Image (cartoon, rainbow, N blue to C red):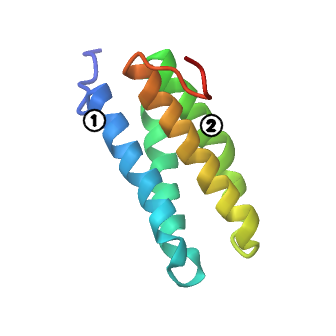
Amino acid sequence: MAEEKKFLTEDQVVELTALFLSCSLLLLREPALYGPLRQLTAAERLAAMVYDDVSPEVRQLLDVALERIPVSHTVTTRRDQYKAIVVELNEALGDCLAARAGLTTGGEA
């Protein structure tokens, strides 16, 4: 069987994931949290599609996304819990971007 062609580079995966997660943070004011929910669902689906094809740094981000996003769907009526998950996802994104750039996070020098 011929090998399946990949349509996204790893950089594109990171870019799209960054867009989805950062938009979810910005859209927290949308009524009923519908906007963030759409963004998180898109990020979850993308993560599942590319999980086996990314580096360990990106996989660490996707692990957090695949663990926390389903939980977020169950707490949409509890705004503080929902916001905490969205913030956690964006912190994981920051860690991923820093690792890819060869930087450290968490106050390390």
Quarter where residue 77 is shown: bottom right
For badge 2, the amino acid type reads Val
Q: Position of residue 4 (x, y in %)?
A: 28, 23
The residue sitting at the front extreme is 109
Can the viewer see residue 54 in this picture?
Answer: no
Numbered disc 2: secondary structure: helix
Residue 14 visible? The answer is yes
- Point out which mark residue 68 bears: none
Where does residue 65 sit, x and y in percent of width and height? 58, 42
Q: Is residue 82 left or right of residue 13?
A: right
Is 92 or 75 nearer to us in this picture? 92
Q: Position of residue 53 (x, y in %)?
A: 41, 21
Q: Residue at x 47, y 49 (%)?
A: 43
Q: Where on the picture, by quarter, is residue 9?
A: top left
Q: Residue at 41% of width from left, 44% of height from top?
A: 17
Is 104 displayed left or right of 69 in the figure? left
Residue under label 1: 12
Q: Nearer the viewer, residue 95 or 67?
A: 95
Q: Is residue 28 above or below residue 106?
A: below
Mark 2, residue position:
64
Which one is in front, 72 or 94?
Answer: 94
